[in-house]
Image (spheres, coloured by chain):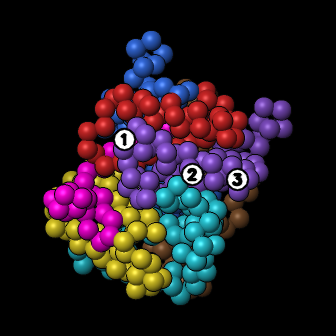
Chain colours: A red, B blue, C brown, D yellow, E purple, F cyan
């Protein structure tokens, strides 16, 4: 019954990519800890680049510099 | 001063239903642990069905099958 | 399939009180939003009073003043 | 490598104000705990006032009363 | 720069198993979304079985019944 | 009424340092967004170095290499 929260910036992850994240994390927990996939919950949060900071500045600012 | 975070899928919970969740959780913490309602904080997150997985697949996929 | 996280200070909640929180929140989500109790997940975090702040000071400091 | 999550109500924080929060929290962790700013992550969540409760009612209701 | 939080019950995951979770999630985010592993953060929370509920009861109670 | 969660590795932050984090974040939210300090909540989580990963490996492994 694990619960996994994945936070990424909101920069165009597709429905298929999100499906792959859900499937991949669920399989990982089964493979490593033998957790039952039926009760593994995965929640993906897509965060605006203005609202995500690293190194003291927002991702929006970093993207402007081409990073 | 408890903090409660409720995550549900974004499938049309009304303002009134969210009010009932806030009121209900606040009362529960008062009844069970005698927590002061004035400082109990409740935050509700409504998550897109593409972004919520259980059993290795998204809620969107499950809803398509009528689950 | 809701996910609920309850954070309280670590001040002696009993196993029975935690059981009542789990049961109460699960029932609330069934009553208000018709959520299936079988897949409602509740996680309780008990946080040291040194690590919880409100009003700019820790709960430890407030408890010393009898609050 | 600290991770900080700031939740505020969605009531018009500007890009500049969010930049100041990211910068301020990152500096605070450097000043107090000597944490490397390059790996400090800050995520800001802006929550609808219907979805934030305190004192058993939503912020929307409180705002209506002028609080 | 994704941030991933994995919550599991505190039932003896080894240092090596936790290492595999960290490595596996980091690789998954690289493979699916091309996220830079150097800035992917993973935090694992191990939660007491009294503090984790599903189906309205704690994991402690379920374990007693052999589930 | 902001809610702030600070996650750091469990490597000996003192009671005084945690007090300074609580005070500093609360003041920051007042200065930047004019948030009332009386209802600003700060929760600090101290995470074991085995349970925190960055760059695909745990902090425990990095500390062994002197990082």
Q: Residue at x 48, y 16 (%)?
A: B67
Counting other residues with Cα less than 10 Å from the Cα at mark 2, is it few (<14), some (14-19), or many (20 or more)? many
Q: Residue at x 44, y 64 (%)?
A: D3
Q: Which chain is home to disc 2?
A: E
Q: Could you tell me how far apart the alpha carbons at marks 3 and 1 are, in whole angstroms?
A: 26 Å
Counting other residues with Cα less than 10 Å from the Cα at mark 1, is it few (<14), some (14-19), or many (20 or more)? some
Q: Which mark is residue C63?
A: none
A47 in the magenta segment: yes
User: Which residue, given by chain and number where applicable, does mark 1 sit on?
Assistant: E33
Quadrant of the frame with the N terminus of chain F:
bottom left
Q: Residue at x 59, y 54 (%)?
A: E44
Q: Which mark is residue E22?
A: 2
Counting other residues with Cα less than 10 Å from the Cα at mark 3, is it few (<14), some (14-19), or many (20 or more)? few
In front of the other: B31 or E32 = E32
Outermost residue to the top = B65
In front of the other: D43 or E62 = D43
Bounds of the magenta span?
A: A42-67
Q: How many marks?
A: 3
- Say whether residue B2 is visible: yes
Q: Which chain is home to disc 3?
A: E
In front of the other: F19 or B33 = F19
Q: Could you tell me how far apart the alpha carbons at marks 2 and 3 are, in whole angstroms?
A: 10 Å
Earlier-in-chain disc, 2 versus 1: 2
Labels 2 and 3 in the same subunit: yes
User: Which residue, given by chain and number where applicable, does mark 3 sit on?
Assistant: E16
Q: Residue at x 23, y 72 (%)?
A: D20
Q: Which chain is home to disc 1?
A: E
In front of the other: A56 or D9 = A56
**Is residue B18 left or right of C41 when viewed as pictured?**
left
């Amino acid at each position: 019954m694990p619960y996994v929260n994945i936070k990424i910036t909101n920069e165009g992850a597709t429905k298929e990519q999100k499906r792959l994240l859900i499937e991949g994390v669920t399989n990982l927990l089964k493979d490593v800890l033998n957790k039952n996939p039926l009760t593994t919950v995965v929640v993906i949060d897509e965060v605006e680049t203005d609202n995500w900071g690293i190194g003291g500045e927002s991702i929006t600012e970093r993207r402007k510099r081409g990073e």
